[in-house]
């Protein structure tokens, strides 16, 4: 998820003998060690020894970056990334070829649908909205996406008295701000999630206030939404899957604990339920780092995945939604409410 960039002021070290690195290697390592959300789950004596042994043998800056990737691997942190000299470095999950055969096309489709909101009155009195990944950065872009999503929901609600299907199967992440703001009519004016630290303490609250999304008291969006009637009790089915991750997982968490809400599909991508912050160490070195977990409105913490109430593993059919097994089950559940 996207958060305000924090500039880290550190003493710039002299050039390392094996190449240019803008700060002390130890400074970056120490920051990771003491701020990772996973810091209490590992043996730091072992990681310390491995890192410093490896760094002594580094012969290039690329070798140095690989030392940090090894640390992320030890932490089982797939959500954090180091952005250095216009390159991304991180520990990414690997999958067997038999899984990649169907997972890669699904992931590619998710990428191709970025920023493309899709709505449909799928059957009489039931609406469908596909919330995609959002790659928006400026305040104007964020508000435009949020307003577009909110307007789409408002229009959909005119003919959806039985309920709404929210499809997050192609939501691979991006900016959480406009997603939750745009879905505010369905979430209601209330706290929708929390962030927790490594000791399970709540450190930040996520709130919806009249369409705007507030994180830790900071207002992230400013849009106009329809506030009457109130739809935050309308029956909703949320569909999730293996490429639902990062901000997509956060949207799912925001709906967990909501009345009349049912989750179907398969668990979200493993390891992407952390809240990340951007920490800039130098002009060419930024850390997108997992510092907190996210908990739902009932304070249930999600450390790895978001799980459905009903597991359905049938193949997706986005070209003909009425032939999609998960959509069929969603419609049946809503019709019976």
Image (spheres, helix red, strand yellow):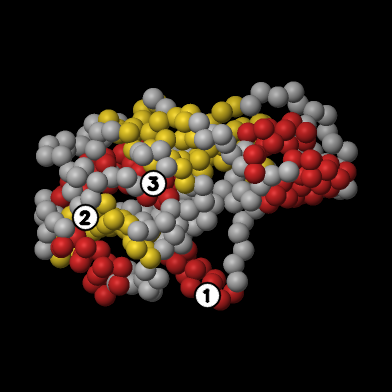
Q: Which residue is mark 1?
A: 101
Q: Which element is circle 2 on?
A: strand
User: Sequence-wise, which precedes: disc 1 or disc 3?
Assistant: 1
Q: Nearer the viewer, residue 303 or 185?
A: 303
Q: Relative to residue 47, is residue 34 depicted above or below?
A: above
Comparing 214 with 147, the one in front is 214
Query: In the rendered image, is residue 65 in sight?
Result: no
- In the rendered structure, find residue 253 and report the number of the disc placed on it: 3
Residue in the picture at 41% in, 46% down: 250
Tally the marks. 3
Q: Nearer the viewer, mark 1 or mark 2?
A: 2
Of the numbered discs 3 and 2, the one sitting upstream in the chain is: 2
Callout 1 secondary element? helix
Is residue 241 at least partly visible in the picture?
yes
What secondary structure is marked by label 3? helix
Is 6 drawn above or below residue 121 in the view shown? above
Choose top left, top right, bottom left or bottom right for residue 86. top right
Determine the residue positioned at 69% across, 36% down.
33
| Marks 3, 2: nearer the viewer | 3
In the rendered structure, which disc, 1 or 2, sits on the residue that comes first in sequence?
1
Q: How busy is the neighbourhood of tag 3: few (under 14 within 10 Å), some, or many (20 plus)?
A: many
Instruction: Return the residue nearer the eye: 265 or 86.
Output: 265
Q: How far is disc 3 from disc 2 in space, using C-alphas?
A: 17 Å
Pair 1/3: label in front: 3
Spatial separation of the CA atoms under disc 1 and disc 2: 31 Å
147 on left or right of 134: left
Query: How many C-alpha atoms fall within 10 Å of the one at disc 2: few (<14), some, or many (≥20)?
Result: many
Residue 12 in the image: state x and y as whole percent. Answer: 76, 26
Residue that label 2 marks: 164
Residue under the image location 70 percent in, 24 percent down:
10
- The quarter of the image holding the C terminus is bottom left
Quadrant hosting residue 128: bottom left
């Amino acid at each position: 998820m996207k958060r305000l960039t924090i500039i880290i002021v550190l003493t710039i070290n002299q050039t390392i003998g094996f190449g240019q690195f803008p700060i002390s290697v130890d400074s970056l390592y120490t920051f990771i060690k003491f701020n990772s959300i996973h810091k209490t789950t590992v043996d730091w004596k072992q990681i310390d020894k491995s890192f410093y042994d490896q760094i002594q043998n580094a012969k290039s800056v690329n070798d140095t970056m690989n030392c940090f990737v090894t640390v992320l691997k030890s932490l089982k942190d797939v959500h954090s990334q180091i952005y250095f000299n216009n390159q991304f470095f991180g520990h990414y999950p690997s999958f067997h070829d038999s899984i990649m055969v169907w997972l890669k096309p699904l992931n590619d489709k998710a990428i191709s649908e970025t920023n493309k909101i899709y709505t449909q009155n799928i059957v009489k009195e039931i609406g469908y909205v596909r919330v995609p990944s959002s790659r928006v950065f400026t305040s104007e872009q964020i508000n435009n996406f949020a307003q577009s999503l909110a307007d789409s929901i408002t229009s959909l609600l005119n003919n959806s008295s039985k309920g709404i299907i929210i499809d997050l199967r192609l939501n691979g992440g991006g900016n959480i701000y406009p997603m939750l703001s745009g879905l505010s009519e369905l979430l209601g004016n209330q706290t929708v999630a929390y962030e927790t630290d490594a000791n399970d303490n709540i450190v930040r609250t996520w709130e919806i206030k009249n369409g705007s999304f507030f994180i830790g008291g900071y207002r992230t969006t400013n849009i106009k939404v329809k506030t009457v009637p109130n739809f935050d009790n309308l029956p909703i089915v949320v569909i999730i899957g293996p490429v639902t991750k990062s901000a997509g997982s956060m949207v799912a968490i925001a709906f967990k604990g909501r009345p009349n809400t049912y989750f179907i599909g398969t668990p979200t991508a493993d390891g992407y339920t952390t809240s990340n912050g951007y920490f800039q160490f130098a002009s060419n070195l930024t850390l997108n780092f997992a510092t907190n977990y996210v908990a739902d409105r009932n304070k249930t913490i999600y450390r790895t995945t978001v799980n459905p109430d009903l597991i359905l593993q049938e193949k997706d059919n986005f070209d003909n939604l009425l032939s999609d097994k998960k959509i069929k089950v969603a419609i049946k559940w809503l019709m019976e409410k």
